[in-house]
Amino acid sequence: MTAVTEHEVSLVPATDHSPQIRSLDLADFPTLVGREEEWRFTPLARLRGLHTGEIGAQSPVVVTATSLGGATFIPNSPKDATRAGFTDRVATFAWTQIADVATLTIPKNTQVAETIQISIAGTNGVAFHQLDVNVEQFGEATVIINHSGSATFAGNLDINVADGGKLTIVSIQDWEIDAVHAGHHRVRLGRDATCKHIAVTLGGDVVRLLPSVDYDAPGGSAEFIGLYFAGAGQHAEHRLFVDHSQAHCRSNVVYKGALNGDGAHTVWIGDVLIRSNAIGTETYEINRNLVLSGGGRADSVPNLEIETGEIVGAGHASTTGRFDDEQLFYLESRGISADEARMLVLRGFFEDLLNQINVPEINDGVRTRIEERLAGLR
Amino acid sequence: MSVLEIKGLEVQVTTDDGPKDILRGVDLVVRAGETHALMGPNGSGKSTLAYAIAGHPKYHITGGTVTLDGQDVLAMSVDERARAGLFLAMQYPVEVPGVSVSNFLRTAITAIRGEAPNLRTWIKELKESMNALQIDQQFAERSVNEGFSGGERKRTEILQMELIKPSIAILDETDSGLDVDALRVVSEGINRVRATGETGVLLITHFTRILNYVKPDFVHVFFDGRIVRQGGPELADDIEANGYAQYTAV
Ligand SMILES: Nc1ncnc2c1ncn2[C@@H]1O[C@H](COP(=O)(O)OP(=O)(O)O)[C@@H](O)[C@H]1O
Ligand SMILES: [Mg+2]
């Protein structure tokens, strides 16, 4: 890949990027105009009123959970008033709109061998959803959430992994081309808890996801993997916030995206905050984008704020490039057609991520779907 | 038996200061079974000749012809040239992250042979060729050229040549950056391909060192974008003893 921009920075002056508002009450959020730092990349006009509240007819998503093993799924648990406030206006709006909460619980000391599958299918209307995934102490599970169909969807995911728990959770955005999806994916980690959150954004008109992690105790480890494609006119936005507020925790963020065609727009924001008490923190974040053809635009903003120097390591990198002519020439000079050469380079670009996603317990469906989408991109 | 014919080849590159003429009329005929050494100082245009024949998009043909068995090479795309029987071992082989050597080779062989090789025989063939070039089997699973030393890259180029079995192979400074042992291993690989009698080799170099292992039938001295002298192996001995200056003085 030809690097267009490359930053390798380990320490930048602290400017406070931590969210200003945390609330379950929509009235606490000012009306959006689009110039706000968190919204400046988002095409508000295409959110179909999720940001203003002037929405069309509601039509709930169809949610099914299968292959639960020892886990329990309740589609309509009562709504609580005790959870932490959301930091995003649309996420809070979704909270105010839902009547109940879907909960998936992995009981204490239970290792679920099956890959738990949750399907969230749009039904061509506006839909709101709240899913809680609770991994109790020393529980272990792998969960795939597959979003499909068409909807204007605001859905939040609250993940709690208690002490010693281990969760791998994949969120696939495999929407129809006209779908809108806004979602806050919040991870909370107990002592020595581990969560690997994988976002695979394949389709939709606008997808705007906010994966974040809070650490409740030392020893937590969060991994965020993301793989996204934007075709002509598509907007795929992922804004990460990693809040190191506990000592001896780790975080690793790896997001890669490909853009193809005019008006393809991807946004990746990686905000990592290491608070003054978070000694022994180890964090790294990287975003790479490959512009395949046309006038796509990839915005990539890594942001690392460090309030203590007593850390194990911190770094970030970001690159955006186009196909490398020398690589293509090399492959073609071995008889490989131009199309196939591009496909090889493209697959190669995602190979390390695919390997991380393709852990044995995760259904090959994910990889197959990515391969199909890749094949359509060449 | 294949024959590559280059006639009056003129090539330009585009630089920041506009187009620049590099090749100024190259005439050369290479037949399968023959080995030609093309020798010349740095910057004389040797790699330009190699890239132009292979079809690198940076090099613009402004005159002359290149044919392989009478077919117009210049009208072919890069991959068509390779499938027609041309092979270029590059002076600086390119890294392709995320594409394993074995995947790359299998894809290339499938393209060149027109069908996927039988898996069992292919694995055996690959293993034997790697052993012969003293390439560790682990390299099959590494990304193409990524993190390879200069010598490892050159050996991998020769590995590709051995598997592809081209009718004409252009080896651009395959000897540079090799230590004595690697030079011997690589030369043996080139000689195995020569011994089939089915490949014509154009060996580009600016040192005579490799010619102690790979004996050329013809030697061409290249300077300022054209061949300035042609002869037999004795020409290489002369260059070894007296340098290029005698041929390149203007
Ligand atoms: N892509 C290019 N852009 C600009 N100049 C080039 C390019 N390729 C080659 N040249 C110039 O052409 C001349 C011949 O280069 P090259 O063919 O690499 O020589 P050699 O292989 O004999 O050392 C040199 O002056 C070199 O700087
Ligand atoms: Mg050269």
Image: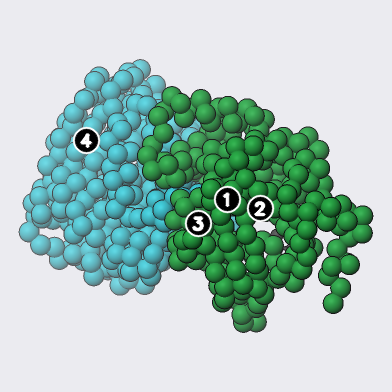
Chain colours: A cyan, B green
Using a 10 Å C-alpha cutoff, classify the residue at mark 4 as few (fewer than 14 neighbours), some (14 to 19) or many (20 or more).
many
Measure the C-alpha gap from mark 3 to mark 2. 16 Å
Residue nearest the viewer, comparing B117 with A331? B117
Q: Residue furthest right?
A: B241
Q: Chain of mark 3?
A: B
Amino acid on which disc 2 is placed: Leu
Image marks 1 and 2: residues in contact by CB distance under 8 Å? yes
Which amino acid lies under the numbered mark 4 shown in the image of this protein? Ile
Disc 1 residue crowd, few under 14, some 14–19, many 20+, Cα 10 Å: many
Q: Which mark is residue B69?
A: 3
Where in the figure is residue A173, as x and y percent of width and height?
27, 48
Residue lying farthest top?
Answer: A109
Instruction: Locate residue A313, reporting x and y percent.
Output: 62, 43
Residue at which label 4 appears: A118
- First of labels 1, 3 by sequence position: 3
Q: Which residue is mark 1?
A: B168
Task: Name the front one of labels 4 and 3.
Answer: 3
Q: Position of residue A94 (x, y in %)?
A: 21, 52
Q: Label 3 amino acid?
A: Asp
Q: Chain of mark 2?
A: B
Q: Is residue B22 left or right of residue A330?
A: right
Q: Quadrant of residue A172?
A: top left
Q: Residue at x 70, y 45 (%)?
A: B150
Observer-nearest of B235 and A232: B235
Q: How far apart are the two marked residues, 4 and 1, measured between alpha carbons?
A: 57 Å
3 or 2: mark nearer the eye? 3
Q: Disc 2 marks which residue? A: B202
